[in-house]
Amino acid sequence: MKPARFAYHDPDHLAEALALLARLENARVLAGGQSLMPMLAMRVAMPDHLIDLNRIPGLDGIVVAEGSLRIGAMARQRRIEDSPAIRAACPLMTEALGLVGHIQTRNRGTIGGSLCHLDPSAELVTVAAALDATIEVASATGTRDIGIADFPLGLMTPSLAAEEMVVGLRIPLWPAGHGACFTEFARRHGDYAIVSAAALLLPDAQGRIARVSLTLGGVSAGPLRLAAAEAMLLGEAPSPALFRAAASCCAGIDAMEDPQAPAWYRRRLATVLVRRALEQAWARTEGVAA
Amino acid sequence: MSESRHIALHVNGERREAETPVRQHLADFLRGTLGLTGTHLGCEHGVCGACTVLVDGRAVRACLMLAVQAAGRAVTTIEGLAAADGTLHPLQQAFCDHHGLQCGFCTPGILATLVEYLAENPDPGAEDLRIALSGNICRCTGYDSIVAAALAAARALRGEAA
């Protein structure tokens, strides 16, 4: 369990890191190391060059501004979890972070690292999809934005060129009064979830659903937005029957199968978790009678 | 020859300097280079939590951090927990009193995790502790004694009778 040899680079500036990434062959970027370090130890990853971002200042900013949230790629998961501003403005993010690995891994792990590792069950990827995040990418030749829907190319493969790195993400905030819930099923607390569900609901003045977002993690290579269930809920008055009907859309999803769980089990879990997430998210909305 | 670097850091309050291969993780550096074998290695890929140490007061997995990344930082290992006169830290004492060590292999990592956790959560419930310790695997599987010891340590750290 020792990494193969690599040349180690720890630049002080982003421009220097991007220049190295453009110039060096078979280079990997090291963020918090909570996924890449095990991959190096098991020699699943054997880069010739490791470019450590941990000495670069300014990549870890958290800015909650009018209507939007921006988080730098190197922001540690624990810092985001503990941010009172994020808890107030984006409670879905805070709730999901409590389920990301363990305290020890969240102390080092970064949001950018989690997005780029792109595990199908990664809570932060599911949250980014639920919130329609935009991923900010930089290379030596410039910057570009990628919508989260276009970010996963396939299993654990982000749509990044070899010379590009993620530098941050932007999230449009939901209005005050919205309710959110992130829930998942894992064999042990902190394990990658078999299935996770994220729900956001915004009530209108009449207590109907003015806006809805429903996303599943762990069922396919990337997060799965449940457009049909969202359409079923929009404009309706919430009720247990409505939430059950919307959740039953999960019975028809194309769920993946792996040694951990068969597809039918993932569909069953998804149905239950979506119903629970909807009920909990609605209970957390404000401004309407429950 | 593997690339190596000379690093300086503080370990248990003492300034240490040494040469380390860049691919060496912090746990191997503490154990092999500095001779601090109280930090244990179970899985070496971030699952078991045995190698947990404190870096600048935060519990981290020492197998998932390169030794070169610890340059300039303050590391606390299990060897740094007791007072200078040998008086055990309240966590160490509570783990002795409540049979929380069992075989003892996972204990250094558990104590490092709890030092940070109890500083931030002085009065946790048993269920909170089980979640806080979910990243530390005990092969003896005797979590009841570990949780009982942690609750007793929390009481002692709050100044109440254990």
Image (cartoon, coloured by chain):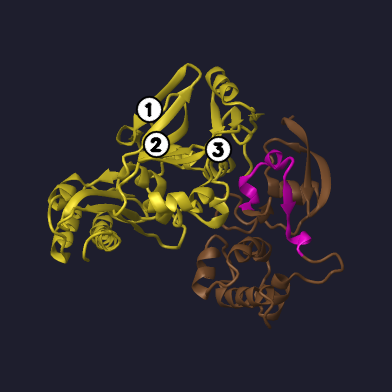
Q: Which residues are magenta?
A: B60-81
Quadrant the N terminus of chain B occupies: top right
Q: Secondary structure at mark 3?
A: loop
Per the rendering, the mark at residue A170 is 2
**Of the two numbered discs 3 and 1 in the rendering, the one whose residue sits closer to the viewer:** 1
Query: Sequence order check: which comes first, mark 2 or mark 3?
Result: 3
Instruction: Say what secondary structure mark 2 lies in.
Output: strand
- Label 2 and label 3: CA atoms lie apart by 19 Å
Q: Amino acid at mark 2?
A: Arg
Residue B42 rendering spot, x and y as whole percentages: 63, 57
Give above or below for A267 relative to B118.
Answer: above
In the image, is A19 to the left or to the right of A169? right
| N-terminal label among 1 and 2 | 1
Q: Is residue A102 magenta?
A: no
Residues marked 1 and 2 touching at CB (< 8 Å) = yes
Q: Based on the picture, tell me whether residue B72 belongs to the magenta stretch.
A: yes
Query: Residue, x 68% and y 40% (percent of image)?
Result: B69
Residues at marks 2 and 3 touching, judged by CB atoms closer than 8 Å: no
What hue does chain B carry in this figure?
brown
Q: Chain of mark 2?
A: A
